Amino acid sequence: MTPPQDAATAETVHREDSSVRLLAQLAESVSTVFRKESELLRAEIDQKARQAAAAVGMIAGGALMALVALHVLAAALVAAVADLGVEPGWAALIVGGGIALVAFALVMGGTRTLKASSLSPKRVMCSAGRDAALAKEATR
């Protein structure tokens, strides 16, 4: 037979059990938060990858359009400018410069979309910071 426990011993055992349960709940909560944050991070990175792919497509489309414009319109425009009395060499330079400006604008629009700051997972980083702060508070 075990000797009866006095009230102080029973209270100590109860507190230890409560502390163990609280620590187990905290560990489970932290684990759940990190798992959900990693799922959110994966989803956001996937979204950013699609955004980057679209931007690369814009750049490629801009480059293709510049080549098509250069080959198809250049000859016609050079001839039209030359018909206005401009030397053919200068006519070709004027037309080529205009096409190059359009191509440059398309490429710059695509590269602006690809900047690292626009591709970083901002929502997850902000949320992870809040979760870390909550975890610190919970352990105090």
Image: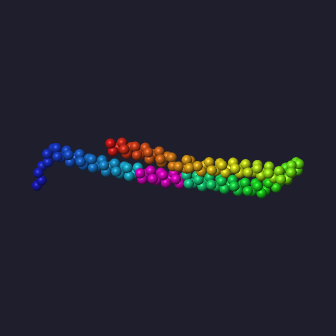
The reply, left or right, for residue 133 in relation to residue 24 is: right
| Residue 26, percent from left and from top | 34, 48
Task: Say which residue appears at 51% left-offset and 49% top-offset.
Answer: 121
Q: Is residue 78 magenta?
A: no
> In front: 70, or 124?
70
Q: Position of residue 27 (x, y in %)?
A: 34, 51
Note whether 8 is above or below 75 in the view shown: above
* Quadrant in the picture for residue 7: top left
Q: Which is more toward the observer, 77 or 51? A: 77
Residue 140 seen from this side: yes
Q: Residue at x 36, y 42 (%)?
A: 137
Locate residue 44, reporting x and y percent.
51, 51
User: In this rendering, would 22 be left or right of 56?
Assistant: left
Magenta segment boundaries in residue numbering: 34-47
Q: Is residue 18 rendered to the left or right of residue 42? A: left
Residue drawn at point x = 41 percent, y = 51 percent: 34
Task: Give percent across and percent down for residue 68.
Answer: 75, 56
Colour logic: rainbow
Q: Quadrant of the N terminus?
A: bottom left
The answer to whether residue 78 shows anywhere in this view is: no
Examine the structure image and report whether residue 44 is included in the region drawn in magenta: yes
Q: Nearer the viewer, residue 46 or 83?
A: 83
**Residue at 69% from the left image edge and 55% from the top image edge:** 63
**Screen quadrant of the C terminus:** top left
Q: Predominant secondary structure in magenta?
A: helix
Left or right: where 34 falls relative to 24: right
